Amino acid sequence: MRLLIIRHGDPDYEVDGLTQQGQIEARLLAERLYKTESIDHFYVSSYGRARLTAKPTLEKFGKTGEICDWLHEFDTRVTWEEGNHASLAWDVLPRIFTEKENAFLPDAWWQDPALMQAGIKEAYDHVNEEMDRVLSRHGYDRCGRYYTARENNKETIAFFCHFGVEVVLLSHILNLSPIPLWQGTIALPTGITELVTEEREKGIAYFRLNRFGDVAHLTMNGEVPSFSGRFCETYEDFSQRH
């Protein structure tokens, strides 16, 4: 089974939609997917920017997507230091998270007072319980840190969602802490992430990450990928996000 996790196009957060550039990205994404992929099922975040990104693809495939509220942005906010405003989990300063040993441990990353107070583990578990329900619907049941292939298949399933929740899914499927993934990776708008099962023993499946945040549909058409989700390359560059 193949999973395609696709981030929404360049967002207009004020209206929960897409910028003009985001609309171009969504169109080029749809053209690429239709030419190169055979997608059996679509699951789409309930947020507008993800639904608008999925719309051109669904129209080309002549299919509808299942709207899933659990796929919306992972927006649990954390107060990392006393007196600070609460921020999203992937907006914490490197100075703070790199000093927390548990942040890098798959089974203990959430054991920090700030994270526990924010209820982040409960939100994280909810997303992944829903994801596992979807995978079970398609024949793969979670068993500890791998999946049992109850009804193995070669279906391709596409998820249109958001970077924060994409990391939550990847960390669960690959058994990694989400914090270094939130901080050390970025799937740019309309980036395609692909995971494929490997069943090296009968009935035991593990997902392998084949590609992450692939935006070739943009660069091959002369489009510069949007900056959304990144921070300034150098501190002095105030034209980029701080």
Image (tube, helix red, strand yellow):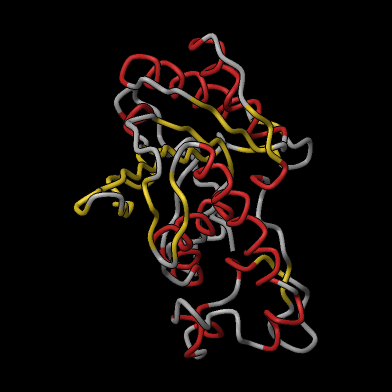
Q: How many marks?
A: 0
Question: Which of the pair 116/21 is nearer the observer?
Answer: 116
Question: Which of the pair 169/228 is nearer the observer?
Answer: 169
Residue pictured at 74% horizontal, 73% vertical: 119
Residue 156 at x, y percent in the picture: 39, 30
- Where 170 falls versus 112 (above or below)? above
Residue 212 at x, y percent in the picture: 35, 47
The quarter of the rendered structure image containing the N terminus is top left
Residue furthest to the left in view is 200
The quadrant in which residue 234 appears is: bottom left
Residue 215 at x, y percent in the picture: 37, 36
- Where 118 falls versus 198 (above or below)? below
Residue pictured at 35% horizontal, 45% vertical: 195
Residue pictured at 40% horizontal, 35% vertical: 224
The quarter of the rendered structure image containing the C terminus is bottom right
Residue 42 at x, y percent in the picture: 54, 28
